[in-house]
Structure formats: C-alpha cells, structure tokens
Amino acid sequence: MGYFGELPNILYQSPLLHKNSTTDFIVIKNIFRRSKLFDFLQGNVTLFNKYVINDGDRPDTIAEKLYGDSELDYIIVLVAGITNITHEWPLQDYQIYDYTLNKYGSEAKMNDIHHYETFEIKDSQNRTILPAKLIVDKDFKMDGSALRFPTNRFTLISQQGNQLLDDKDEYTVATDNIARPVTNYEFEIQTNEDKRDINVLRESYIQTFINDLRDVVRYEQSSNFINGRLAQTENTNINP
C-alpha cells in the first residue's frame, strides 16, 4: 500500500456541479494529516543507513532496491526529510547547466562570483587556525601569525598543495588568497551534490515505521469523528 493508501479519508461537502443538494458529501484523502517517526526513530542514528542518490535514482527505484517494494517510496521521502520533491531531490548531472542558465539568465552571470570559500589554515603545531569552506566575502581578513603567534608559522592547506604563509600581521583574500571565489555555477553544482546524501531507514524497521504512521494519521474522537479512518467536515452551506 502506497502513502496515499495509508492516509485516512474525509467526507467533504461536494463542490461538483451535478450534486443533488448542499448536503451532498464526497470521500477524499486527507492529505493534511501530518506524519512523523517515533521519537526513538528520530533520535537513534543506528536505525538509519546513509545513502547517496545516484543519477537516475527516484524514490520508487530506491525503495525497490532497498526494500523490494517500489510502493514504499514515501518512506524514502519522509525519512530523508523531503517536503518538496521538485526542489529537494537532486537534478541529474546533465540538467544542472540548463537549470543554472535559466536561473541566472546568461552564461556571464552563471560565472559571476557567488561567494568566497576559505581554505584551511593550520599552525606549526597542526592546530586549525581557520576552518575550510567557511563562506566569506571578498573583504574577509584575519590576524596573521606575527600578530597572534610570533614564534609560530601558518600553512594554507589546499588541493593544489600546501603553502607556508608569510609571517605578518594580517592575511586577506586579495593579498594572500586565503579564500577562493565560487561562481554561481559552482555553487549550484555543490548545492545539488549536497542533496544526494540522505538517511534511509533500515529494512528491519519498515513495519515499525508503517505502524507508527498509521497511528499518527488516525483520527481522534471529536465532533466530526466517524471512525479512525474517516471524519466529516462541517457543512457550511446549511443556513441556521
């Protein structure tokens, strides 16, 4: 049974033109019932595995691969914390260029600088002075080794190779390249890559998840209660 099959029904006053009277109701799925995991599921990382979404993966194909049932795709989405599949599911690699071009309007703007990203800087005792990948602007600066640690030297760590920085009072982006520019295009690529890492529920907890989901969406006693799977809205068309 898929996600919508788990949702309860609601009797809603009919909006159909061919209804017989204002007291006619139709049965629809109540998509506004909220669902959540058990508290112990939310707080216990041992119940989840990490999964990297590959190009071409969809929630249903992942559910089929992990659980042998494509209709459990809603569990993939809910556990991953995805509320808008259109914006939160990663694009395929070939789609990124067109998406970015459409968003920024031209190749020139795609290649404009979005932000600067710091390199890691360590001192001679291997202590981190500046963490890597902090988002900064072009005017970012920091105290140099001569000002902070007169007998110590700083080293900039990068994929291009480590660089011993000059022993001086201050380092800046412009003079010492302590951060690199990240273009709009690079930013969109990295944002898309970040979406690929999700949590998935271990197969042994699938039935527990489904049972909890059913408990959460079940109706409680109220004036509109019919049973745990069915409630009725007020009829606003009836005059007092």
Image (cartoon, grey):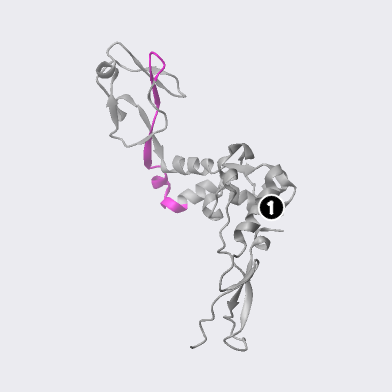
Q: Residue at x 51, y 50 (%)?
A: 98
Question: From what the image shows, is residue 112 above or below residue 103?
Answer: above
Q: Residue at x 63, y 49 (%)?
A: 76
Res 33 → quadrant: bottom right
Quarter occupied by the N terminus: bottom right
Question: From what the image shows, is residue 186 above or below residue 100?
Answer: above
Res 214 → quadrant: bottom right
Question: From what the image shows, is residue 87 above or below residue 223?
Answer: above
Residue 24 seen in this snapshot: yes
Per the rendered image, the range of residues in magenta is 102-127
Q: Is residue 103 left or right of residue 220?
A: left
| Residue 205 x, y percent position in the rendering | 68, 45
Question: From what the image shows, is residue 8 above or below residue 201?
Answer: below
Q: Residue at x 31, y 35 (%)?
A: 138
Q: Amino acid at mark 1?
A: Leu
For this rendering, which residue is in front, 128 or 26? 26
| Residue 82 x, y percent position in the rendering | 55, 51
Residue 53 seen in this snapshot: no
Q: Residues within 10 Å of mark 1 (few under 14, many from 20)?
A: many
Q: Residue at x 62, y 36 (%)?
A: 46
For this rendering, which residue is in front, 23 or 90? 23
SS category of the residue bearing label 1: helix
Q: Is residue 64 magenta?
A: no
Marks counted in the figure total 1
Q: Is residue 158 left or right of residue 65?
A: left
Q: What residue occupies the far top of the structure in this picture?
A: 151
| Residue 168 x, y percent position in the rendering | 26, 17
Residue that carries the numbered disc 1 in the rendered image: 72
For this rendering, which residue is in front, 165 or 207? 207
